[in-house]
Image (spheres, helix red, strand yellow):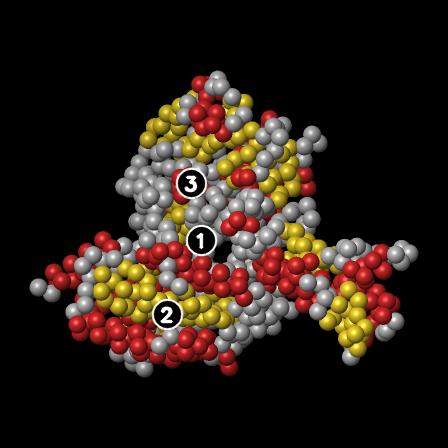
Amino acid sequence: MREDAAVRGEARFAGDLAQAGALALVIVSSTVAAGRVRIDADAARAAPGVVAVFVADDLDLEPIHEIAAIPERFAQPPLARDAVHYVGEHLAAVVADSEAAAVDAAELVVVDYDVDEPSTDGDDDDDDDDALTWERPAARDAFAGADVTVRAEVAMPRLAVAPMEGRAALAVPARDGRLTLWLSTQSPHWSRVQMARTLRMPVDEIRVLAPRVGGGFGGKANGGIAAYAVVAAAARRLQRPVRFVESRTDNLVTMQGRGVHLRGVLHARFDGAIVGLEVDERCDAGAYPTTGSVEPGKTELMACGPYRVPAVRFSGRSVLTARTPTGAYRGPGRSEATAILERLLDELARATGLDPIEVRRRNLVGPAELPLVTASGAEVADADHPRVLDTLLDTVDVDAWRARRTARLDAGDPHALGIGIATALDSTAWFARTESAVVTVTRTGMVRVDCGTASAGQAHARAFAAIVSEVLPVAAESVVVVAGDSARLRESGGSSGSRSLQLAGSAIRLASEEVWESVRVVAADLLEAAADDVVVDGTRAVVRGVPARGVTLAAIAQHHANRPGAATLDAHCVFDQPGATHTSTAHLSVVEVDLDTGAIAVVHHASVTDCGRVVDPIAARGQVVGATAQAIGQVLFEEFVYDDGNQPRTATLADYLVPSAAEIPAIDARFVTTPTAVNPLGARGVGEVGMVGAPAAVHAAVLDALAPYGVTHVDLPCTPERVWRALRDARASTT
């Protein structure tokens, strides 16, 4: 598949897959946030084209419970049985011979509600609302040496993940009881395990494949997606292929992340040196706690960021609410930790009169201090935070931007400039650190790579092919990567947690090196040389020092195939990384605020990232730029809104504002390299780090522009109305 296939309209996603005789499935969902339900599906069952209508009692599926830390009593049933707990909870599945017939019949399903008041909105301190809690105490005298104490709050609203492609599935049952699923998922192997549990099937009887995936951003990272379990169960019950494609509204309503409120206290000396940090976090877990509800643990772990923080006190709660369960969203936990810490550092700069850049510089951990275990428990090594910051400052003329800011202020220009800085640390490959790969030389000299980590839009294949071509005498264009098929490799952690390149890429590297040892023996036979003297020279194997004597991989493969009893030129390697890696970044953002309307435009954004070795520069830059664009959306535009009855108010893209190219400036994303020692590539993750560092910089720039007018805080997102009201209130308070 061409790398530009998606742009050219040639890529085939899960929703594009066709199967002879496939039925269409449409889900009927709750329209109330809390209540008892009675479902009458008789009219729907009698509708034209309908094959079946299933409710919970028909399928009797095991509730979905994926994360051991979450008490099993919070497991979500794929179809609600007697009661609903949020708008969008699945109630019934209509299966028909066409999608149109299924949609029409779904409207005939009658649901009677005995509406209840939601049991909780999560705003109180009732311990009964808590799904998970965290407590990290600090020593009694931990903050005693402080001269200055500053406080800040950051409320990060619920966000719709809004990938290009929503959830989609095709389930095909076999006569022998086996089941094949094509899913839009970041984790086909985890999906296989969770489907086996929910369907009460032997895991070996399920095969999951991930075709092209139109983005995930964490929303498709968990394997136990309720809709997929229903599709699979319906296919098994009917012994017919069944397909499902989620609508955009359903995706916006049911795939959400963030929803946290952070309060922070920073203790420091007059010279800006940090003495200690206190963070309290409340996380809106939704009705059924899942991935999002465990992320405060990551916030705690990454609370110190790239800074020297001697002491940390952390308290966190994930609370039940009558809303959609929150899942992961790009940089979960780490983005929250950065947001509150960077706000506190800006407050410290104001309190001490120090430059915000200088406050950061004085507290950054230097390379000579590594490795270290931070006060919040993160094990950090192989980083050069000061170099990252210095490189950013060499890239951007901060003094020139500040001069323009001052000139506008002095002239009374109604378009104020603001400059924001943030330095951040992302934890990558922080879980499931084992991946495997098989590298095979075919008879034609092509190389096939089988790996479990499937791309969710990141174009992994190009980087994986480049890794192979560094070891074997083959052009990257002659490497075929096959990924995301649970039948080819038994286990994989999937594409999440910024783990794919460093783990799967390392397994591919090791397998390629093992294959090379076999290839060079065959090449030595052809070249009549010692195997130790055979080296790679581009797309040929040559004798060291005699580049004219060389053979292609095709010739080697053919020669090997003609040898009696020749084994396949292949290798299966498993790579197990001993620990997480940490990617360092610095972002600087410049915004323009219209003081009359409150409208904000980002006019310049630059970043420098150290993710170790950059294997694929195009993809790495694309990851940082894409994450930065999402960060701008998070700070300026995006918020999933509920009314007082927990009814969704932003369930279409006309109401939920995702930034377009018109709202995103040209982003200057650069890299420096400090290789890590924990994997053979020297690489760290880069998929989420832009979303960890950029939001804090953009938010800081907004507040910097508004500071001369008495505005010290604007809730996210910083919409024109919120900015206008903050300016109005600040003016009123001075009159």
Relative to 429, is 300 on the left or the right? Answer: left
* Residue type for callout 3: Arg
Residue beneath the point at 67% across and 32% down: 174
The residue pinned by badge 1 equals 329
Relative to 496, is 278 on the left or the right? Answer: left
Residue beneath the point at 60% across and 59% down: 462
- Camera-side residue: 242 or 299? 242
Dot label at residue 185? none
Q: Position of residue 374 (x, y in %)?
A: 47, 71
Distance Cα–Cα, label 2 vs label 1: 22 Å
Q: Is residue 176 above or below residue 311?
A: above
- Camera-side residue: 634 or 331? 634
Q: Closer to the camera: disc 1 or disc 3?
A: 3
The residue pinned by badge 2 equals 588
Q: Secondary structure at mark 2?
A: strand
- Mark 1 and mark 3 lie on one chain; the one further toward the N terminus is 3
Mark 2–mark 1 contact, CB under 8 Å? no
**Disc 1 packing (10 Å; few <14; some 14–19; many ≥20):** many
Q: Secondary structure at mark 3?
A: helix
Specify the quadrant of the image occupied by residue 279. Answer: bottom left
**Disc 3 packing (10 Å; few <14; some 14–19; many ≥20):** some
Q: Secondary structure at mark 1?
A: loop
**Disc 2 packing (10 Å; few <14; some 14–19; many ≥20):** many
Dot label at residue 248? 3
Mark 2–mark 3 contact, CB under 8 Å? no
- Mark 2 and mark 1 lie on one chain; the one further toward the N terminus is 1
Quadrant of the snapshot with the C terminus: bottom left
* Residue type for callout 2: Leu
Q: Is residue 164 above or below residue 508?
A: above
Distance Cα–Cα, label 1 vs label 3: 17 Å
Distance Cα–Cα, label 2 vs label 3: 34 Å
